[in-house]
Image: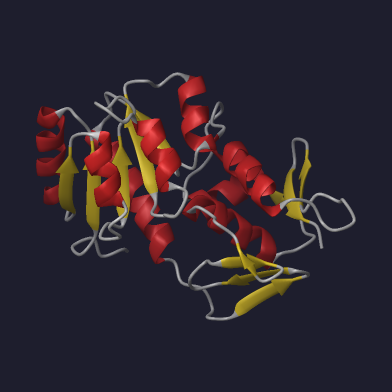
Amino acid sequence: MVELSNNSILIIDDDQELCALLADWLRAEGFSLTSTHDGSSGLEAARSGQFQVIILDVMLPGMNGLDVLRSLRQNCNTPLLMLSARGEPVDRILGLELGADDYLAKPCDPRELVARLRALLRRSHTQGSGNSLQVGDLRMDMDSLMAWLDEEALPLTQSEAMILRSLLEKPGQLIDRQTLSRQALGKPLGPYDRSLDMHLSNLRRKLGPHADGRPRIQALRGRGYLYSN
């Protein structure tokens, strides 16, 4: 069980009434909450490194949420959940493509929001064996979840790092989609949930192929994924 009393949350949303309601609910659940109400100040606060999870709205005055996410992911891997009234599949996919770890549509059940935040926090607090794992030219620290390809650091989000860790722990072995989602994302996949696919797509792009052109992450349709060694 993750201790939540010291976990700080940043919410970037221009709906101040909603922020106040969420603050009451989340503080009652043991979270420490800070709110900002426009994109620019939200981005500045998010970059401060003071927060363990960020909740980000899409529709913001000035700099919109997708631009905030795009700028943030250039140098910040803090776990991020998008919370938006724009809940169409294309909006969810775009948010995940840009590096969001999770996406929840408004209006949402506060209990589901708490569950999603706890899942993100559990993943951020997960500790490995303390050993670096080396598979070919790829190395990963199992505690920090930092990864290096040919000794060059990879800019991975938390979700991407957790997926890579699960695959590297069993190189060459197939992991089915549900198992990978539960291990890496902390949740089962719903029938129309494409979050795992989007994170894997981003991860493949950042890793690139092996030197001989083989894909590092192979998908076996209807079965699962493996890291080819």
State the image coordinates of residue 47 (x, y, percent, origin top left): 32, 54
Task: Identify the coloring.
Answer: secondary structure
Tell me what residue is drawn at x 54 percent, y 55 percent. 156
> Which quadrant would the C terminus be assigned to in this image?
bottom right
State the image coordinates of residue 205 (x, y, percent, origin top left): 67, 45
Residue nearest the observer in this picture, 212 or 27: 212
Tell me what residue is drawn at x 35 percent, y 57 percent. 121
State the image coordinates of residue 80 (x, y, percent, origin top left): 38, 46
Work out which residue is located at the far right of the displayed protein and give it. 212
> Which quadrant would the N terminus be assigned to in this image?
bottom left
Q: Relative to 42, is 181 on the left or the right?
A: right
Q: Relative to 49, is 76 on the left or the right?
A: right
Q: Relative to 180, is 37 on the left or the right?
A: left
Tell me what residue is drawn at x 24 percent, y 26 percent. 61
Q: Relative to 123, is 27 on the left or the right?
A: left
State the image coordinates of residue 32 (x, y, percent, origin top left): 16, 55
Is residue 29 shown to the viewer in this render? Answer: no
